[in-house]
Image (spheres, helix red, strand yellow):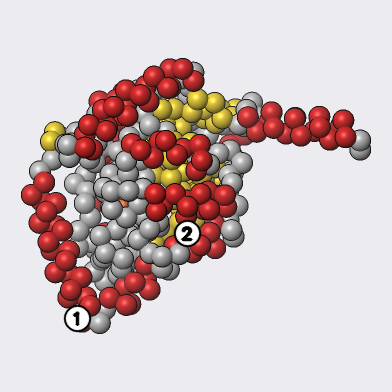
Amino acid sequence: MNLYFVNLLVQFLLKTKQTMYKFIDNTELRKEKRLIWASTRSVLENIGFLRNKNGKKSKSRWNLFVRLLHIFIWLLKLSGHYHKGYGNAKTIEVTEITLEYPNLPQAFDGFKILHLSDLHIDSIPGFASLIIKKINKLSFDICFLTGDYRKDNSGSILNILKPFRILSKYIQAPYGTFAVLGNHDTFLMAQYENQSGLELLINESVEIIKDDDRILVTGTDDPFSYYTEQALLSLETKCYNFKIALVHTSELAKAASVNNYDLYLCGHTHGGQICLKKGVPLISHQFEGKQFNNGEWKIGNMKGYTSRGVGVSGIPVRFNCPAEIVLITLKRS
Ligand SMILES: [Fe+2]
């Protein structure tokens, strides 16, 4: 094969890759909306104005939690359980599930989704390489990340950039890697979007194109601490045969179900992270109902999955609640 044909083949492959997904809004409109979003969220972050769909959040509840956490860390160390819990946090399970839908477009039958949530990648030194070891053994078509990339919910993000770049090189999903922000994340992360090898969905939708079929994926900003009506509006999308919502928490699940979404993926709870023997969480940081704490759930025709998360926050330990990477296979029934 001479150089001319090699060049043609490369161009064809690049073109094919470019048409695997397409944003609903054009580039100019996306830029404009992002600017408005960044201005709003920067103010909310900088003045510490945290709000969910019920309004402004109380800081005293969070301050009490932080104080209790320090006492708990001290008790774990004193009782000799800290080391065991730290080892548990570094052990990641792969959960494989199959979800069946009669309305799934034919081309997406067997489509595999890698769902990663709550990486908190700087909580444990070298954690990215532990995740890579697991991901390397899996094959998938698309990757969705549902928020919380750093340990703390304020401060610099520079320490997570390097491990994140390394991780995203290994993800390499043929139909793209899409991410939403969580309550530990900052609007500044959007500046590094191009370098990180993933596409942020901030109250935005993208069409995934396979053969002649299309499905819609919508990602919202975090509704746990930075809720705005724009998140809700972004779920009011037009008709598609199949729609997926990516949100950090389960808080927008009812709205997504009303808008005929078929699948809702979220995290945030860490499954409790520290649980009693039967997986009952001591604290879950969600108030939507215990069915949303982890695993599969359903609202109307919409199926949902709350990931127990890959990483840890607050305290780098897990008990009776293993970290998970979720591999979802979509099937047409
Ligand atoms: Fe988290």
Question: Mark 1: which amino acid?
Answer: Leu
The circle drawn on residue 128 is: 2
167 left or right of 272 in image: right
The residue at the far right in this view is: 1
The circle drawn on residue 25 is: none
Secondary-structure class at tag 2:
helix
Q: Can you tell me whether the CB of the residue at mark 2 lies under 8 Å from the nearest atom of ligand 1?
A: no
Measuring from the top left, give residue 185's x and y in whole percent. 32, 44
147 left or right of 8 in image: left
Nearest the camera: 317 or 321?
Answer: 317
Q: Is residue 46 visible?
A: yes
Q: Which residue is mark 1?
A: 78
Q: Residue at x 14, y 51 (%)?
A: 62
N-term-proximal mark, 2 vs 1: 1
Cα gap from disc 2 to disc 1, whole angstroms = 29 Å
Q: Is residue 267 shown above or below 19? A: below
Measuring from the top left, give residue 228's x and y in whole percent. 24, 29
2 left or right of 309 in image: right
